[in-house]
Image: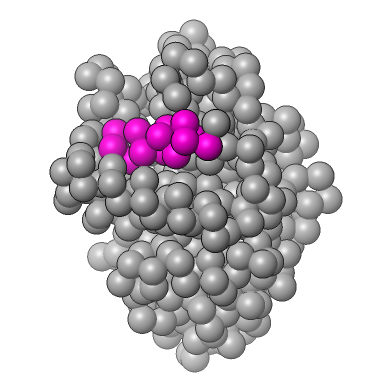
Amino acid sequence: MKTEEFTPDYTNILEVLYNRRPKYLPLYEHNIDEPFIAKFLGREVDSTGKKGADLEEHYRVVCSFWKDNTYDAMSFEVKICEIYPDHGAILGGRPGPIQNRADFERYPWDEIPEIFIRTYKPHLDALGKVMPAGMKAYGGCGYGIFESAEDLVGYENLCLMQFLDPDLFRDLFLKIGDLYQILWTWVLDNYADLFVFCRMGDDLGYRTSTMLDPDVIREHILPQHRRVTDLVHSRGKKFLLHCCGNIFSIMDDIIAGGIDAKHSNEDQIAPFAEWIERYNDRIGLFGGFDMNEIILNPYDTVYEKVLREGTEFRRMAKGYGLGTGNSVPDYMSVEGYTAMVDAVKEIRRRES
């Protein structure tokens, strides 16, 4: 399928959320970094400081990149952690602003919705004005419940808090859940039609296990996930969870919480075929190709692998959308990325 012949159809990728076979294989990415888009296009792509018509032009360029690379929909999130006062502990190397009960009580929770709306309304408005016909975004509020706790406390200190002050640990997750209800409600009240489906990313694991004890995740985090999922479903939208790591111990609980699809895979945890074999009868699945495979290999190697395995994944799974197992960072090679996209075009051509 030639790029200029492609007409996006967001209902095609939505089929994966219903765990049904789309009419053609959709491409999906959790995120494509703007510096990579700039490298791909050979021009500056940066929304920093842009307003009004300049911001609309920025999103026009970004949308065109996704459309020209034959995506039915594009990733877009308004990132909660990035507007938290004194945020940054999620990156490591420093404690977050909440270390004890006094910090928790004085933290400006009530100011966050206003900051969030002031920061992101211009971006949502600009994107809505320039979205190409046939396309929508997928996403919503960026960062997850656990990631917010990491950003506000710090991972190591959060692990200590669960033992040293279990009441504060409990109250923190409840408060974050309350905040997410407010922010997600605002997004859905004002911009639901911009999104073909909603998504939250919350990395709960690493290569060998979950970041916290599975029972702790079940008690404190997944109920807050469920609040978001239920809210999204109440607005007639489907919900995808992006979650990195070895989360097999809690995956049944996550599915029971009502998600419609899952993304993120890494070959060192399990081959993607295992995710399909375990869960394809219950949820749609996205991804399939470890970032390292796309980054480190030449065009022909990536093309042949994606063509071969992508065809097999589409055969195995009820609902499947192809992409990297995580995202496209700025250091992704244009050659590897183009090979992946070209292989998907060939899979579609062979099925047409």
Total of numbered circles in the picture? 0
Give the residue drawn at x 17%, y 49%: 297
Is 345 situated above or below 161?
above
| Residue 48 shows in the view | yes
Q: Which residue is nearer to you in this view: 101 or 19?
A: 19
Is 344 situated above or below 289?
above
Most extreme residue toward the bottom, as rendered?
A: 163
Is 58 situated above or below 214?
above
Residue 342 colored in magenta in the image? yes
Quarter occupied by the N terminus:
top left
User: What are the residue bounds of the magenta stretch?
Assistant: 337-351
Residue 227 colored in magenta in the image? no
User: What kind of colouring is applied to the model shown?
Assistant: one colour
Give the residue drawn at x 16%, y 43%: 298
Is 291 situated above or below 100?
above
By secondary structure, the bulk of the magenta-drawn segment is best described as: helix
| Residue 242 shows in the view | no
Drawn side of residue 145 relative to residue 306, left or right:
right
Instruction: Tell me where residue 24 appears, x and y as whole percent.
Output: 57, 37
Give the residue drawn at x 63%, y 37%: 23
Q: Quadrant of residue 273?
A: bottom left
Most extreme residue toward the top, as rendered?
A: 53
Give the residue drawn at x 33%, y 67%: 267
Instruction: Tell me where residue 71 appears, x and y as whole percent.
Output: 50, 31
Instruction: Tell me where residue 175 appears, x and y as whole percent.
Output: 65, 65
Instruction: Tell me where residue 111 appears, x and y as whole percent.
Output: 61, 46
Quarter occupied by the C terminus:
top right
